[in-house]
Image (tube, rainbow, N blue to C red):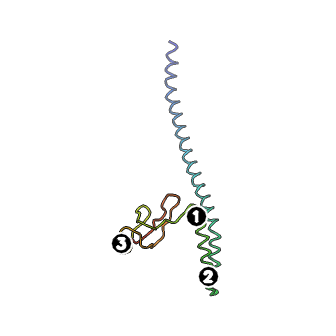
């Protein structure tokens, strides 16, 4: 007879303990999600800061080119613009950005056809001209190349 009240008390405590464990587990999971989101934001901010730090010398070169333009030194302006272009292209390449090839046939995965023109020199589907260069980041297309295609 003395065992019955003990069993009833144990049975009542087990669901309460299970509820407490579930609540703690849910709280731990919420804290984990918040921590992961915070770490992701910090990682993105750090990556952006690195990229911006590498872009600053390009801005400096561009400002020097603009200063040369004010003095009407066209040869220096042209050289300054070439320097900025080389610097920016090298920066993009270091970060895995590459131009999309537009030689040969039209590829809908990396090209965007803006116009189809009849052409006697090129076969149908060949890229005739590039309106805007396209770029890839690794294997991912950042911006498709906008092209004119032969009919």
User: Nearest the camera: 120 or 70?
Assistant: 120
Secondary-structure class at tag 3: strand
Q: Which residue is mark 1?
A: 93
How busy is the neighbourhood of tag 2: few (under 14 within 10 Å), some, or many (20 plus)? many
Task: Name which residue lies at 59% across and 69% down.
Answer: 88
Where is residue 89 drawn, in percent x and y?
58, 68
Where is residue 93 drawn, in percent x and y?
58, 64
**Furthest residue toward top:** 1
Q: CA distance from mark 1 to mark 3?
A: 31 Å
Q: CA distance from mark 2 to mark 1?
A: 24 Å
Looking at the rendered image, the quarter that the C terminus falls into is bottom left
Task: Name which residue lies at 59% across and 51% down.
Answer: 39
Q: Which residue is mark 3?
A: 116
Q: Which residue is mark 2?
A: 77
Q: Is residue 9 above or below residue 127?
A: above
**Quadrant of res 114:** bottom left
Residue 43 has which mark? Answer: none
User: Nearest the camera: 136 or 39?
Assistant: 136
**Furthest residue toward front:** 121
Q: CA distance from mark 2 to mark 3?
A: 37 Å
**Furthest residue toward bottom:** 72
């Amino acid at each position: 007879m003395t065992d019955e009240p003990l069993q009833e008390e144990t049975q009542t405590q087990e669901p309460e303990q299970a509820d407490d464990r579930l609540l703690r587990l849910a709280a731990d999971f919420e804290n984990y999600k918040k921590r992961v989101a915070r770490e992701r934001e910090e990682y993105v901010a750090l990556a952006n800061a690195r990229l911006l730090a590498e872009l600053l010398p390009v801005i400096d070169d561009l400002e020097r080119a603009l200063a040369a333009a004010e003095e009407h030194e066209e040869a220096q302006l042209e050289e300054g613009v070439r320097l900025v272009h080389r610097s920016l292209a090298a920066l993009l390449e270091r970060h895995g950005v590459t131009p999309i090839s537009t030689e040969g046939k039209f590829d809908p995965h990396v090209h965007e056809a803006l116009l189809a023109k009849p052409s006697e020199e090129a076969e149908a589907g060949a890229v005739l001209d590039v309106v805007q260069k396209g770029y890839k980041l690794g294997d991912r297309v950042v911006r498709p190349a906008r092209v004119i295609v032969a009919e």
